[in-house]
Image (cartoon, rainbow, N blue to C red):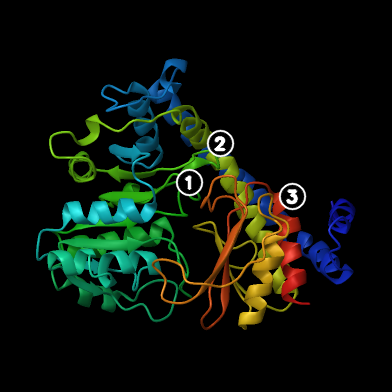
Amino acid sequence: MKRELAEAAGRFDIPARIIAAAESALDDVVGAWAQRDANALAISAKVTAAFLRAGVNEAHLQGSTGYAYADHGRERYEAVLADAMDAPACLARLQLVSGTHAIVATLDALLPHGGRLCSLTGRPYDTLKMAIADHPAGLVRANGIDYLEAAWTAGPQPGEEDVHDALRRAPDVVFVQRSRGYATRPSLSVKQIGRLVELAREFAPGAHIVVDNCYGELVELEEPCAVGADVVVGSLIKNPGGGMAATGAYVAGTKEIVARVADRVFAPGLGAAVGPTLDMTRWIFAGLHRAPRAIAESLKTLDFAAALFARLGFEVDPPAGAARTDIIEAIRLGTETRVTAFARGLQRLLPVNSAATLQPGPVPGYADPVIMAGGAFVSGSTLELSCDAPLREPYEVYLQGGLDVAHGMLATMSAAAAATA
């Protein structure tokens, strides 16, 4: 593959020094890629079994309009996704436009007025923290919520004493963020989430446990509901959509919680009975079926990027071949100039808007200027190759997704060339 990689890179004027580093990076990822394929096989079997148990047939691929009463395709899709998420029930709707939307709706459905919300994984990512606590119309200010965070200052997971201290304040809802967001902390494994669930059951037995599952679905064989979480929430245009869902988000968990969220999203008494799927049912089914393979391609792309940038002398997290629990790679570039150059170099080889000249700027929900590279066929689909970077210390860029490892290698080589020019 080294010769073919060099020839392909030559089409895009990628320098010889980057090609040489990329050839060495290939040696670093051979074992990891074999493990990614083996993991994808196991997860594909799990998802396929969920389709078979639901008895999906061609009639279920048709969409619905209007109120969408008795949308049997929607019901079967939610049954398949609930099974894949190790949950008893699921609400997956196009009317939920993002993971943040679904998370806020879930928290609002579960928190009593004047209740207490505890984030066990420190500060949530920027947009969610804004929606929960910082915006004047957010949950905290609008509903008199007492919001607290367990400190997470260092290490691979929150310290148990910090978790104990937060849980002793008797929260009504415990929130766990699986992925790293824009933080320097690592993402959490399902096993680590299971430990947080155990602590929550011990020290706050009455609390509902909500896990933000964005970017982590179908990376591991088990999902957080399998280790005791009450509900998981995520976006269909990330992992579960397989690059084919055009919009939507999901809430999967206990039947009681899913029903409460449906009432909150639509209206009490209507709940999950409404919500048209338009012409999207076929594509969300197909995307979920293909998601394990698409996610494996993403993980391979990130392994390659980690190996390449480590060869070029940069700090990466996680390193190539390490256990992965989401589809995000953090690359510490150290300066605003390198971060901006990386994003522009990546954009140059994305299939949509490759000629765009990226500029940092304000983004709703973020306190710092952000630069983003994205050339996806579905806007905002971070399972497709993209990167985000807030322009603040320590100047890390967060590389996400990649549906095709061949394209992912070339695009990350272009980003490396620009960042090290």
| Label 3 sits on residue | 406
Q: Is residue 109 above or below residue 45?
A: below
Which residue type carries mark 3? Answer: Ala
Q: Nearer the viewer, mark 3 or mark 1?
A: 1
- Check whether the beta carbons of the residues at disc 3 and disc 1 lie within 8 A of each other: no
Q: Picture coordinates of residue 187 (x, y %)?
A: 46, 65
In which quadrant is the C terminus drawn? Answer: bottom right
Residue at image coords 48%, 27%: 282
Q: Picture coordinates of residue 407 (x, y %)?
A: 72, 51
- Secondary structure beneath disc 2? helix
**Image-quadrant location for residue 413:** bottom right
Separation of residues labelled 3 and 2 (CA atoms): 18 Å
Q: Nearer the viewer, mark 1 or mark 2?
A: 1
- Secondary structure beneath disc 1? loop
**Image-quadrant location for residue 408:** bottom right
| Label 2 sits on residue | 290
Which residue type carries mark 2? Answer: Arg
Q: Is residue 224 left or right of residue 221?
A: left
- Secondary structure beneath disc 3? helix
Residue at image coords 86%, 71%: 17
Residue at image coords 30%, 39%: 91
Q: Residues within 10 Å of mark 2 (few under 14, many from 20)?
A: many
Q: Earlier in the sequence, mark 1 or mark 2?
A: 1
| Label 1 sits on residue | 237
Q: Residues within 10 Å of mark 3 (few under 14, many from 20)?
A: some
Task: Report whether residue 296 is seen.
Answer: yes
Which residue type carries mark 1? Answer: Ile
